[in-house]
Image: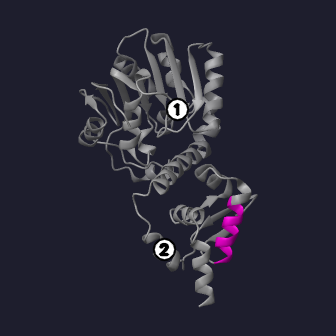
Amino acid sequence: MDELLTKLRAAAEPTRLRLLALCARGAWCVSDLVAILGQSQPRLSRHLKLLTEAGLLQRTPEGANAWFQLPEDADLARSILARLPEDDQRLAADRRTAARIAAERARAASESFRRHGADWDELRALDIAAPPVEAALLAALPGNAQARLLDIGCGTGRLLELVAPHVAAATGIDASRDMLALARTRLAEHNLANCAVRQADLYRLPFPDAAFDIVTLQMVLHYAEDPAAALAEAARVLKPEGRLILLDLAAHDRAELLKRLAHRWPGFDDAALNGWLGAAGLAPMQPTDLGPLRLWCAEARQHVTA
């Protein structure tokens, strides 16, 4: 009885429940958990120590890091987690942030990133020729030289470099500091004074409603835990009659991509995308077929609020 009570007391705290829910989905190190939960390292370390001592978490040292996950015999922890509401906003936000960090980890660790540095991009990693894709993206711009553009998931800033001559101002956001450092280097090298980048979460964009004429998402949505929420937030910052430009993988059955590049989704079909776009208050346009990729555009017909 004492052992059971120890486990129950260890789990009976909001942050520790969140930690259990995250570690039930995979292994995380302390720095990842700090980023996901937004709490201090000493505080989380104390929580993790208590959960580990109670047998609810397993700690695996690896070099300078230690990784935490549920042990194989964590029946009690799984039983507790099964009783948590699926629609809990804090847990949903944790899942989205965790998915984003896992994608960043895969990007930064990829051989292509290490070899090519600032020239890394998703198209190169997938062996897709960039010129026709970039031409299609530029053709999708509405042709407003006074437009303000937001690139969500800007990565190394290649799309910003492409659109800079065609818009008045372009802003890129990315969650990865490493990617933003590379993007800033690119923008400085090409003297793109009308472009800027900043760190931000695609689910909580730090911009007011109707702030941009164009919003782009290039090879971002297949990493998203909640694509519909990401598109709704993108729609929120679009001006009425503004344009959303979305480039991503068409639906495919290449299971290795889900593992090798930490993709959350095996591409998208028109029905799914059009449904999400419509729910976000956007009017879908005719998509463009680019082989393994697809280019979807949509226009904001009215002001959209979150």
Q: Height in image: 159 above or below 260?
A: above
Near-viewer residue (6 or 143): 6
Q: Height in image: 201 above or below 83?
A: above
Question: Residue at position x 39%, y 31% from top?
Answer: 236
Judge from the rendering whether residue 133 lies leftward or rightward of residue 55; answer left or right.
left
**Where in the figure is residue 221, as x and y percent of width and height?**
41, 40
Quadrant the N terminus occupies: bottom right
User: Dot 2 surroundings within 10 Å: few (below 14), some, or many (20 or more)?
Assistant: some
Near-viewer residue (157 or 94): 94
Q: Is residue 46 magenta?
A: yes
Q: State the residue lying farthest toward the bottom.
A: 1
The amino acid beneath tag 1 is: Pro
Q: State the residue lying farthest toward the top.
A: 145
Q: Height in image: 11 above or below 241?
A: below
**Where in the figure is residue 115, as x and y percent of width and height?**
63, 37
Residue 53 makes an appearance in the image: yes
Indicate the secondary structure of the residue bearing disc 2. Answer: helix
User: Dot 1 surroundings within 10 Å: few (below 14), some, or many (20 or more)?
Assistant: few
Indicate the secondary structure of the residue bearing disc 1. Answer: loop
The amino acid beneath tag 2 is: Ile
Q: Quadrant of residue 11?
A: bottom right
Q: Which mark is residue 206?
A: 1
Q: Which mark is residue 305?
A: none
Magenta region, mostly helix, strand or loop? helix
Which residue position is annotated with label 2? 80
**Where in the figure is residue 272, as x and y percent of width and height?**
27, 43
* Circles 2, 1 touching at the beta carbon (< 8 Å): no
Magenta segment boundaries in residue numbering = 44-54
Residue 119 makes an appearance in the image: no
Q: Earlier in the sequence, mark 2 or mark 1?
A: 2
